[in-house]
Image (cartoon, helix red, strand yellow):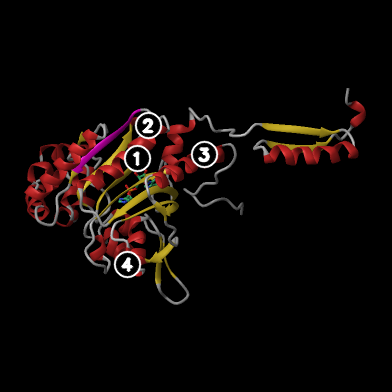
Amino acid sequence: MKLQSVRGMNDVLEPQIFLWQAIESRIHDLYRQFGYVEIRTPIVEPTALFKRGVGEETDVVEKEMYTFEDRNGESLSLRPEGTAAVVRSMIEHNYLRENPVSKFYYIAPMFRHERPQKGRYRQFHQYGVELLGSPDASSDAEVIALHSLLYTDLGLKGVELRLSSIGCNDCRPAYRTLLSGLLEKELANLPEDFHKKIHTNPQRVFDLKNEGAKVVASKLPKVLDHLCENCRVHLNGLKNRLKDLGVPFELDPSIVRGLDYYNRTAFEFTSSHLGAQSAAGGGGRYDSLFENIGGKATPAVGYAGGMERLIMLLEDSNPAKRPRPIVYFVGVDEAGLQRCEPLCFELDAKACIARSSMRRNPSKLS
Ligand code: HAM
């Protein structure tokens, strides 16, 4: 049997690797410039973290995790995303006691057993930030504006910011009950595998791709008309802050993030150049996640984008395919080759890529 890489998991080879390196370096610089500190958490976590953090009823946990028992019989999973692990780490190290508002970033591989297609892989990489400890709309604005800046800075065209609020524990239950009641009357127009979600997560109707479901969704009441006063004030604060920062956005109440931990702010950067998988990245506020996984109530907001999708968007206009000039030295004989090697070293030190080799047949050299 020919050994190949696992389906949906890719090698990154030259010349693409140059673009990866250039972008990663830009992302590291930008995040650090804004006071975010890198965090590295393990690739493998207890399965329970994602069940409680991301939500047992989400597609990610229900169908897409790489879960296995280790030799001690403990259920472990390859992380499908980064947020739950960052929060787990904060709780474990009681980190926020000394640093009540903390800002972290990561660029790291994630794993989801999805059907591979363009822009969707089983191992993919996310760059992202988590701003922990602040309930203020200005923190949401910072996270959003930072990525708007990143995309402008990288010269991405056609990237749009779609913004919504999905309410909080005060206003969401009533809105969900309203949706569930209306959806019960539309069973015939909704895909069967969605029927069980009508009561557990009816808002996911806005994410269905099926034509009949899209018609149903278009007639449903919109979440933005059912926010409580506090959520409305928060969203208005965020909108004003984004305007102050010159970040254009479009309000889109059909945004439902695929992970259960969000409340209030939900947003995505999308690009029509990405095809069916149009989300360059997504994020939002998650004020209940700390408590859900055993910590103290802590407000937080974050965002993650997909590296592969960013690479796709940049590939055509890639100025960094060859970040360094390549210089070749050919030694016509052993003595010549010996002279080449220090020259290569000297050029490498000056950030060229230098290679030396010995000409096989010096007599043919004109
Ligand atoms: P997410 O929307 O599930 O959010 O993923 C964020 C981004 O990761 C997506 O918009 C997409 O660009 C990329 N992505 C997701 N799945 C795949 C895949 N199978 N193949 C390629 N790219 C993919 C989160 O994961 C949240 N943790 C984001 C967040 C951070 N929210 C708060 N803080």
Measure the C-alpha gap from mark 2 to mark 1: 8 Å
Label 2, ligand 1: CB separation under 8 Å:
no
* Residue where numbered disc 3 is placed: 22
* Residue where numbered disc 1 is placed: 147
Measure the C-alpha gap from mark 2 to mark 3: 16 Å
**Amino acid type assigned to the residue bearing label 4 in the image:** Ile
Measure the C-alpha gap from mark 2 to mark 4: 35 Å
Q: Mark 3, residues whose alpha carbon is within 10 Å: few (<14), some, or many (≥20)? A: some
Q: Is residue 226 visible?
A: yes
Q: Mark 1, residues whose alpha carbon is within 10 Å: few (<14), some, or many (≥20)? A: many
Extent of the magenta region: 158-164
On the picture, is 293 further left or further right than 314? Answer: left
Measure the C-alpha gap from mark 3 to mark 1: 17 Å
Residue 91 is situated, as x and y percent measured from the top left of the image, at 32, 67
**Amino acid type assigned to the residue bearing label 3 in the image:** Ala
**Amino acid type assigned to the residue bearing label 1 in the image:** His
* Residue where numbered disc 2 is placed: 152
In the structure shown, which secondary structural element does the residue marked by tag 4 occupy?
helix
On the picture, is 267 further left or further right than 80? Answer: left
* Residue where numbered disc 4 is placed: 91
Q: Is residue 345 above or below residue 156?
A: below
Q: Residue at x 16, y 51 (%)?
A: 202
Labelled pair 2, 4 in contact (Cβ < 8 Å) = no
Residue 75 in the magenta stretch? The answer is: no
- For marks 2 and 1, the one nearer the N-term is 1
Q: Residue furthest bottom?
A: 72
Residue 247 is situated, as x and y percent measured from the top left of the image, at 27, 33
- Classified by dominant secondary structure, the portion drawn in magenta counts as strand
- For marks 4 and 3, the one nearer the N-term is 3
